[in-house]
């Protein structure tokens, strides 16, 4: 069940009945705005669908660890934290699936994320057999700047703690998510500066807009 704050925003685990509303929210607010998606022009305009992003988002929501913030009597989805669990072998499966993706822009983005994560060997490094991943944080453009994403992060960490996870991780692709993750106590363990990540012709692969200049993989160990 959700909880209600004075400004009529409720929080709760995303139930299956709201999956399609969350996808609609992501189409409007995340697919175009996320810094790497924007840098490569993954989605042509707000509201546009993206089959693979949607399928990834749905399988994350089905794991039952994702949170939503809803507003008012209409219970409109205004923010989400899509959280998932990663286990050994998942990265290798993701790489195999990615190789079959028909969208070169999508392959470029997840190629970078998979490559960076592979290098880190997190299961061995932290001696864990599952990782709580903060995968997507997205807030409706009409209610940004009011602390909603910080609240979704805080509640996600509480959930991870409650469920007994020892390691939390976020692949933060822009300055704001890095700031939010740092405020929740995550620390960067790996950084890729976008201006150094170039193709064989020397061209920057992700020409992000300032202030988004790097990918940082950030983690927090829970007791
Ligand atoms: C990034 C995003 C989730 C922030 O949501 P939000 O509810 O507006 O964020 P908050 O109000 O909780 O602010 C979080 C921190 O980031 C900063 N921040 C967020 N958006 C900012 C902006 N446009 N300009 C400057 N700072 C910003 C805030 O100042 C705040 O830091 P503070 O606590 O020190 O003041 C939202 O802008 C969004 O959905 N963007 C598109 C999707 C995306 O990029 N998601 C992150 C990658 S997964």
Image (cartoon, rainbow, N blue to C red):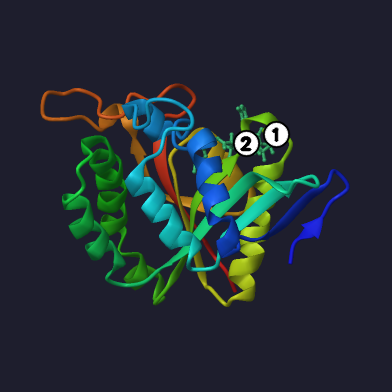
> How would you rate the neighbour count of disc 1 (Cα within 10 Å): few for under 14, some for 14-19, many for 20 or more?
few
CA neighbours of label 2 inside 10 A, class few (<14), some (14 to 19), many (20+): some
Q: Looking at the image, do the residues carrying marks 2 and 1 touch, with CB atoms under 8 Å apart?
A: yes
Where in the image, quadrant-wise, is ligand 1 located? top right
Number of the label disc, if any, that sits on residue 125: none
Q: Position of residue 77 (x, y in %)?
A: 65, 46
**Residue shown at the point (25%, 33%) measured from the top left:** 197
Mark 1 CB lies closer than 8 A to ligand 1: yes
Quadrant (top left/top right/bottom left/bottom right) for the C terminus: bottom right
Q: Name the residue under label 2.
A: 140
Residue 15 image-quadrant placement? bottom right
Please give left or right for residue 128 compared with residue 152 in the image: left
Residue under the image location 40 percent in, 49 percent down: 54
Residue 200 to residue 15: above or below: above
Disc 2 Cβ-to-ligand 1 distance below 8 Å: yes
Residue 104 placement, left or right of 193:
left
Label 1, on which residue? 143
Residue 116 visible at all: yes
Real-space Cα separation, disc 2 to disc 1, in angstroms: 6 Å
Q: In this view, does 202 lie to the left or right of 34?
A: left
Tell me which residue sits at (79%, 45%) in the image. 72
Q: Where is residue 168 in the image (x, y as percent from the top left)?
A: 51, 63
Secondary structure type for disc 2: loop
Q: Can you name the residue that lies furthest to the right here?
A: 6
Most foreground residue, 66 or 86:
66
187, above or below 214, in the image:
below
In the rendering, at what x and y percent does residue 216 appear?
Answer: 42, 44
**Looking at the rendering, in which quadrant would you find the N terminus?**
bottom right
**In the image, is 210 to the left or to the right of 184?**
left
Res. 66 image quadrant = bottom right
């Amino acid at each position: 069940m959700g909880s209600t704050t004075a400004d009529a925003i409720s929080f709760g685990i995303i139930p299956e009945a709201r999956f399609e509303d969350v996808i609609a929210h992501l189409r409007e607010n995340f697919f175009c705005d996320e810094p790497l998606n924007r840098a490569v022009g993954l989605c042509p305009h707000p509201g546009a669908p993206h089959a693979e992003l949607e399928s990834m988002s749905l399988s994350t929501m089905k794991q039952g660890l994702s949170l939503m913030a809803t507003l008012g009597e209409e219970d409109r989805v205004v923010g989400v934290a899509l959280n998932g669990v990663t286990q050994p072998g998942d990265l290798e499966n993701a790489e195999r699936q990615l190789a079959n993706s028909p969208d070169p822009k999508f392959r470029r983005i997840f190629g970078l994320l998979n490559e960076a994560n592979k290098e880190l060997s997190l299961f061995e490094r932290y001696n864990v057999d599952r990782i709580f991943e903060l995968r997507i944080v997205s807030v409706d453009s009409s209610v940004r700047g009011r602390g909603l994403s910080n609240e979704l992060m805080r509640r996600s960490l509480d959930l991870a703690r409650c469920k007994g996870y020892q390691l939390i991780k976020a692949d933060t692709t822009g300055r704001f998510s890095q700031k939010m993750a740092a405020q929740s106590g995550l620390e960067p363990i790996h950084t890729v500066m976008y201006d150094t990540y170039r193709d064989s012709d020397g061209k920057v692969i992700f020409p992000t807009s300032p202030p988004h200049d790097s990918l940082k993989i950030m983690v927090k160990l829970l007791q």
